[in-house]
Amino acid sequence: MLTTLVRRALYALLVLAGVNLLTFVLFFTVNTPDDMARLNIGGKRVTQEQIDKWKSERGYDKPLYWNASAEGGARLTETIFWERSATLFKLDFGRSDAKQSSDIGHEIRTRMVVSLQLAVPIFVLQLIASTAFALLLVYFRHSRIDFWGVVLCVVMLSISSLFYIIVGQYFFSRVLRLVPISGYAGGLDAVKFLVLPVLLSLLSRLGTEARLYRAMFLEEIGRDYVRTARAKGLAETLVLGRHVLRNALIPIITSAGSYLPYVFLGSLVFESFFGIPGLGAYVIDAIAGQDFAIVRSMVFLGSVLYVLSYLLIDVAYTWVDPRVRLQ
């Protein structure tokens, strides 16, 4: 198992290197350092001296990939790619292009705490609610409860999350005045700002997840071991809880594990609409301002989290199913 994990870790490094290089190439295919300087300086009349000064302060005055004027290893290291992208593997995120005083690493550590306060409750409650609702539909399968439950799931997954946000803000914040419409506060005061986005995010994903889990449970309910359990006289609730749920954990882990990167990176839509200063809002602002330093850092961090999440999924398979071995 250890050998397999080491081999997959080496594969992950190759994937991260490819993603890092592709991100760099795509960004500088669309924008040159001069374009970035004009955008950040602003104004209609930008002189070449201002552009050169901006590039010099941020290290964009060097060649992209190969510095022919340097000697030895400096030909590779004294380039924009090495100084602005390769250093990400040391978790050196550098500073923002728009604000040189802004340390990206500090911003990530600070905002990640805020994103976790929003994403962890969503992740846990979503998993519990979706699994419980799917088990309820399977328990009452081929009945009106099951039929209308599936209809409700289809309706919920057909509605955009933006609709939930707009209606939720209007109804709970403007009409009932139960929670603030947007904003954030530290400490225990954060609860009143986070309860609405958590609830709306739960509703927006419940239909998709519950319908998926229901299909998984229905596939397991017709297997031989379930008929054997019923023949032994076990109640239907015990059959669903002890046998069906346990044997359907692998697809559930796959579905839930793919959501783990969002737990750390935050929700782009919900953080932006509710004014929550997490990593999701940080990415949106960086994209709007074409801040390459922040974008490349977040893309790299997202790639790392995706690779780790799928590695954890493979390990979790061995815990829930003794037939699975990492070899």
Image (cartoon, helix red, strand yellow):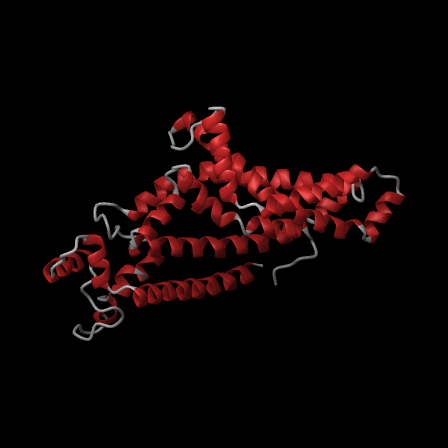
Residue 38 image point, x, y percent: 20, 58
Residue drawn 54% across the image and 55% down it: 310
Residue occupying the point 53% across, 49% down: 259
Percent position (x, y) of residue 99?
22, 48
| Residue 16 relative to residue 250: left or right | left
Kindly tell me whether residue 195 is visible in this rendering: no
Q: Is residue 201 visible?
A: yes
Residue 61 appears left or right of 272: left
* x and y, in percent, of residue 8 in the image: 51, 62
Q: Quadrant of the N terminus?
A: bottom right
**Position of 127 compared to 120: left or right?**
right
Quarter of the image where one finds residue 144: top right
Q: Quadrant of residue 81?
A: bottom left
Q: Which residue occupies 42% across, 62% down?
A: 16
- x, y percentage for residue 12? 47, 62
Between 87 and 294, the one nearer to me in the picture: 294
Q: Which of 41/252 is in front?
A: 41
User: In the displayed structure, would residue 174 be above or below residue 94?
Assistant: above
Classify 8 as above or below 262: below
